Structures are given as C-alpha cells and as structure tokens.
Amino acid sequence: MGVRVAVAGASGYAGGELLRIIAGHPDLEAGPLAAAASAGVPVTRAHPHLALLDGHAFETLDPARLSTADLVFLALPQEESAAVSAALPAEVPVVDLSASFRLASPRAWSAYYGTPHAGQWCYGLPELPGARERIAAARRVAAPGCYATAAILALAPLVAAGLADPGDIVIVAASGTSGAGRSPSAALLATEVIGSMSAYQAGGTHRHTPEIEQALRLASGCEPVVSFTPMLAPMPRGILATCTARLCDPGTDTGALRAAFAAAYDGEPFVRLLPEGRWPATAATNGSNMAHLQAAADPHAGRAVVVAALDNLGKGAAGQAVQAANLMLGLPETAGLPLQGVAP
C-alpha cells in the first residue's frame, strides 16, 4: 500500500495531469477523486488516456472525505480552494495549485484578485534558496503559477547575483490553451486558436505579476518592477517565456550569466541550462517536470536575455505539486516525475 492522496478538482486539466502522475508514482495511490460537477461520472470519461483508473468515479467535493487521505491536492479555482482548505484538519498535508495562498501582501492580492486575502502558505518552488527545507517542514504548500515558475527560474539567479536590475524587467510569455482550464470559452475554440497567436491581460494586469515580483524581491532585496505580457499560443500545453532585464554592468557577457545559472541550479534535477547556443522549445519539455533555460547578454541593448520553456501542466502545475508533496512526505523528490519530454 502506498501513500493515499486525494485530488479535489480531478476532472480538470491540472487534475487530470495529477492523476496521470499519481498512477505512475511508485509511492502514491489514488484516494478520493472529487469533482463536484462530475460526481458519479467515471474518471476515464473525462480522462480517457488514464486507462489504469478504469473503475474509478469522481466523488462529490466533501472535505471530510478528502481528509481521510494522507495528503490532499487542491486543483480548484481560488475561491473554492480557500473555502475547502479551511474545512480540512490542520494535520492533513495540503498542496494547493490555485493562487489562493501564494501572495504575502493583502494589498497586492486585493489589487489583482479583488477578493478577501486568505493568507500565505509556504511557497512551493523547491529550486529557490532554502525553499526545499521549508517545503519539507510545511503542512500547507502553495504551488506556484505556471508563468511565474518560468519567469522566476529565469530571473532569480541573475538578480540575486547582482547581474541584472530587478527594477527593469520585461517578460513576454506564450502559453498553450490548457493554461486557461477546461471550462468552455469561445476564445478557446479551435477555430479561434488554430493559426493565430494573441496577447491577453496586457498592461500589467495579469495575476502572476505580483507573484513574480514577490519572488524577485526576496531574491534581490530590492523592489522589482515587472512588465509582463502573456500570449495565447495555438498549442494545447507548454510555456515559452522570454525574460529580459537591464544589465547592472553593461560589460557583463554571456559567460557571466551562464555561470550564475550554473551556480544556482547545479545538481537540480528539474532545471537544465542548455548548451550555449541552443534555445529552449516547448516540445522538448512537454510531458515532463523539466524547465529548460538559456541565457545571452545583449551588449547592444545592455540587457540580459533569458528564455525558459516548461510544460504548464507539468513543472507549471501538477508536476511541481507532486514535487512538493514528495518533499512533504519524506519521499525522494524525483519520485514519479518524468525527466524526459514527449516528442513529437
């Protein structure tokens, strides 16, 4: 018998990816799989690729039932997640994939979400300094957002090393359509998406902006200013983030930037600095828990350029949540998490 885990919001894309990882995990087994609108529906009707879950059906969203598991994953909208988590016993470990508990500042939360601030949990990005130990000791962990994960991994080592100015950061990042969730939307119809690429929530309004700034503030000790433009790409999954920041010393070269990444991520199982000259691609990380990075100094503009690729449902959501859960449960951090992508 393995460690029994529950998933609330199991019928969504992130929930389905959690189920896929759990089904192949050597130490975890599926407990209650809750999906309020799909209660009683076979899991394989929503996720036909999960043949090992034949015979399982979604349950109603009952906190008492969820709390019978050894650990609970919440893959719910933030409004629901905050309410459900409040009803779970304090001793039950919980990993929340929503934004509910990521931000420390009630002011930032109110500005971007417009609802009461529910508080902050341990931030679940293990690759940040000291985070692994904090996650392992926590009973409540907030998994980072997908865009935020890509941007933070791309920028934190440079601002921490004093190579890049945290007050002058520009991020343009494209995501696959699964990042918008499974709820029907005219903007996500194949007719609208295929053959087109579009920006959305531009002008500093995307909710991952304060999350990115919060992490970079902690990394640099300075007040960051981030201009973030997200884009919708005609692909089901993946994130490609191009992050630039003004160099503190215009003479900084690519070798110095790469050295900072090597120092920050040496030995990290899920972050790979690609060989110089090879740039990240979403296809290389899809289906994995990997983030691929590449950096270059742009002497003409006096800026550092870092490109990050990851699977928004993997390292950007479910994979990262399982990575945190492994740490919380005292399991090998890499257990059950794919290091290789799927191609073509």
Image: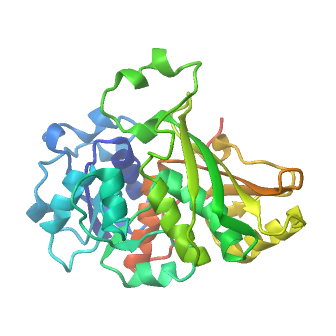
Apparent side of residue 278 relative to residue 312 in the rendered image (left or right): right
Give the vertical position of 33 relative to 321 (above or below): above
Q: Position of residue 285 (x, y in %)?
A: 62, 48
**Quadrant of the image occupied by residue 220:** bottom right
Query: As rendered, which of 328 and 167 lies closer to the eye?
Result: 167
Query: As rendered, which of 166 and 313 lies closer to the eye?
Result: 166
Q: Position of residue 51 (x, y in %)?
A: 36, 41
Query: As rendered, which of 114 and 329 lies closer to the eye?
Result: 114
Q: Is residue 95 visible?
A: no
Q: Position of residue 196 (x, y in %)?
A: 57, 21
User: Residue drawn at (57%, 44%), measured in percent from left and top?
Assistant: 239
Q: Quadrant of the N terminus?
A: bottom left
Query: As rendered, which of 116 and 31 lies closer to the eye?
Result: 116
User: Residue drawn at (27%, 49%), measured in percent from left and top?
Assistant: 77
Q: Position of residue 8 (x, y in %)?
A: 23, 54
Find the residue positioned furthest to the top.
191
Apparent side of residue 130 relative to residue 256 in the rendered image (left or right): left
